[in-house]
Amino acid sequence: MLSLALAGKPNAGKSTFYTASTLAEVDVANYPFTTIDANRGVTHARTRCPCLDRDERCGNCEDGIRYVAVELVDVAGLVPGAHEGRGLGNQFLDELTNADAIVNVVDASGGTNAEGEPVEVGSFDPVEEVDFIEEELEQWLAGIVHKNWESVVRKSRSPDFDMDDALSDLLTGVGASEYDIAAVLRDLDYSPNPQDWDDEDRVELGRAIRQRTKPIVLVANKVDIAPPENLKRLAETGKPVIAATADGELALRRAREAGIIDYHPGDDDFELVGDVSGAQEKGLERIRDLMGEHGGTGTQEAIDTAVYDVLDRITVYPVQNESKWTDGTGNVLPDAFLLPRGSTPRDLAYAVHSDIGDGYLHAVDAREKRRIAEDQELEEGDVIKIVSTAK
């Protein structure tokens, strides 16, 4: 399963974002280090369900909206110096290794300082959060390289030494593949002799590995009280920035659970369908105003941006019956897989099960009812039957 990690300083709203996105109960409070042990839950990326192209809904979507499972990890907040062990930084960074992308929740209101302590709204520059979070992640990776560099130096004394292989052995544990290492080294100016590398070389390697294997989406949280100039400055960082109110999304999810509103996560509005008090209605209307201004609460958009834009995934639906779009027991479109763009039918077969991949014979486009080439690139929303010797 694709994995996203929530990063950010303490008290920026990470735990509220996590709760709103997963509806899992965690501690949420207005003080630093609310989260001590990592919370792991399931959130969902939102996309259009292929059943909209048929006469009936599949039963596995919400009115044609398909939600595809993604792991979401919320861990202890970072403070400056986390890579050296300050705060609960080492605990956070260790939990980060399996993340495919990072959702950096920033207090756009400027109402908490670098340590996560409450200050006057607007008195802290949220861009500083962006910079130090990246710096901590990159220094952490550089530290891993530095700590294990002697092993690379020893390997370099062998006549068949290969830098790519040595660094792959070193960094696969933090989510870097051999392909990632090769791509990073192509863009770096470095000595082929590891003994010539200095600390700056290792920091540069850590920075390049982070950028390639841990891309970041910025969530400008607390947009309801954020000064407009803060949002503008965050947008100028050049990273994907999503204006969000995690508090607002959590309120909507709770209201939906209680049957008060009709709402699908990611919608830009909701419908009031239950009885509410005057105070509740006033609160919901404030959220509606924010949604109208920003196109929603931002939490679902942040997940979708990380999955579909930054990680460039597509949603593909394997079926056994290409006419009815069902599995072996008659369920319509029961499964959805998030695959890297450029994936082929064989890649889908292996995603379903290694035995299916090993026994791959051919694939059928269920929309067109025709066999497709093994090297054909799949597209968002494809419905595919895999024919395999494996059952």
Image (cartoon, rainbow, N blue to C red):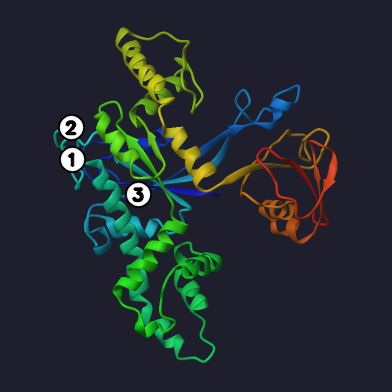
Report crowding for label 3: few under 14, some 14 to 19, many 20 or more residues within 10 A (C-alpha).
many
State the mark number for residue 327: none
* Closer to viewer: mark 3 or mark 1: 1
Name the residue: 79% across, 35% down: 367
Residue position marked by numbered label 1 in the rendering: 124
- Horizontal arrangement in the rendering, residue 281 relative to residue 343 (left or right): left
Residue type at numbered disc 3: Val
Residue for badge 2: 121
Element class at badge 3: loop
Which comes before the other along the chain, label 3 or label 1? 3
Residue 298, how many percent across, how many down?
41, 31
- The spot of residue 337 in percent (x, y) is 63, 45
| Circle 2 Cα neighbour tier, 10 Å, few/some/many (<14 / 14–19 / ≥20) | some
Q: Does 64 appear above or below 115?
A: above
Cα separation between marks 1 and 2: 8 Å
Left or right: residue 340 versus residue 275 is right
The residue to which callout 3 is attached is 75
Assess whether mark 2 and mark 1 are in contact (beta carbons under 8 angstroms): no
Per the model, the C-alpha gap separating discs 3 and 1 is 23 Å
Q: Quadrant of residue 23?
A: top left
Please tell me how crowded label 1 is: few (under 14), some (14-19), or many (20+) other residues with Cα within 10 Å.
many
Relative to 145, is 55 above or below? Answer: above
| Element type where label 2 sits in the image | loop
Where 209 falls versus 148 (above or below)?
A: above
Residue 365, located in which quarter of the rendered image?
top right
Residue at 52% of width from left, 43% of height from top?
Answer: 309
Q: Earlier in the sequence, mark 2 or mark 3?
A: 3
Q: Residue at x 22, y 55 (%)?
A: 80
